[in-house]
Amino acid sequence: MQEYNELVTTDACNTYLEKADKNIQSVASTFSGTAFPTTKLIVGMQCMRTDDSNNIYKLTSTSPVTWELVPSKSYVDNAVTTGVKSVTNFKGATSTASGAAGLVPAPAKGMQTEYYLSADGTWKKVQQRSIKEVIDIVHPVGSIWETTTTDDPNTLWAGTTWVKMDAGRVLVAAGSYTESGTTYTYNLGDKGGEAKHQLSTEELASHGHDATSSVAGNHTHGITTGTNTDSPYNMVSTQAKYANTTRYTDSSGNHTHTINIGSAGGNQRHENRPPYTVINRWKRTN
């Protein structure tokens, strides 16, 4: 390694000149050698490594000692050449093997739009679908489309057929479920329910009614003469007690009473629908 010394103005002339000459030679040769300098280091000094393609390094720190490569045209050219040689072509994946990164295959003339690079390594044209093909995917036959507009899907999506579903009906999922010990089964396509319902006697809660009766009524009494000792017709009147000649018989006459039972209710059907919002509902049939 060539020598580099700090110049001191108090040095003798011959000593000073010798140091300056060595410094100039060292700087001119960029401290070339097979190793970096280890003494008299000054940040910013350079070193050419003759054992590393004459690449030049610059001292950027003395604590710790750090030498950094100064890129040169030759270094960059060599690096690029080496890098390009190591790059391979892009390799597509298969059902049994993964692909490999690399250079993308060049697209042919006229493929500047509507093409994409597939994972198998080839350029493929983007599949263009018609509106009907899209609707076939999104709303296949049998599906339901709901809207808050008056749009007609038969017009919106030419080539498809839709029918408006029954008005006033909500949707119920097919299947069975149990509530309060009772199992309910709904088969696909079943219909049921009522918008308004009138309760039957069996549907009423168990209850009672107040009743009142009239107090008016007619009674009859029979009169017999002679002796009658049969009970209860042996009641003797005051006169009979003295004269012992006349007896009375007493009986209740046939009669009726009016019973009045209170009633209530207007015999009207009650609302049987949950809160709702009206929409248009269509079913695709073809």
Image (cartoon, rainbow, N blue to C red):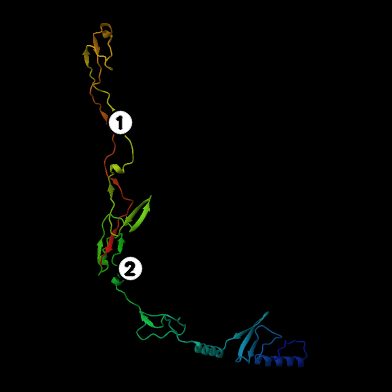
Circle 2 or circle 1, nearest the eye: 1
The answer to which of marks 2 and 1 sits earlier in the sequence is: 2
What residue is rendered at 63% in x and 85% in y? 58
| Residue in front for this viewpoint, 53 or 133 | 133
Residue 109 image label: none
Circle 2 packing at 10 Å, graded few (<14), some (14-19), many (20+), is few
Residue 138 image label: 2
| Residue in front for this viewpoint, 23 or 246 | 246
Circle 1 packing at 10 Å, graded few (<14), some (14-19), many (20+), is few
The residue at which mark 1 appears reads as 211
Q: Most extreme residue toward the top, as rendered?
A: 242
Question: Is residue 209 toward the left or the right of residue 28 in the image?
Answer: left
Quarter where residue 191 is shown: bottom left
- The local secondary structure at tag 1 comes to strand
What residue is rendered at 36% in x and 55% in y? 177
| Residue in front for this viewpoint, 285 or 32 | 285
Residue 213: x and y, percent?
Answer: 28, 27
Residue 182: x and y, percent?
Answer: 36, 51
Question: Is residue 29 toward the left or the right of residue 260 in the image?
Answer: right
Tell me: residue 126, above or below residue 89: above
Quadrant containing the N terminus is bottom right
- Find out whether the residues at labels 2 and 1 contact each other: C-beta distance under 8 Å: no
- The local secondary structure at tag 2 comes to helix
What residue is rendered at 27% in x and 6% in y? 242
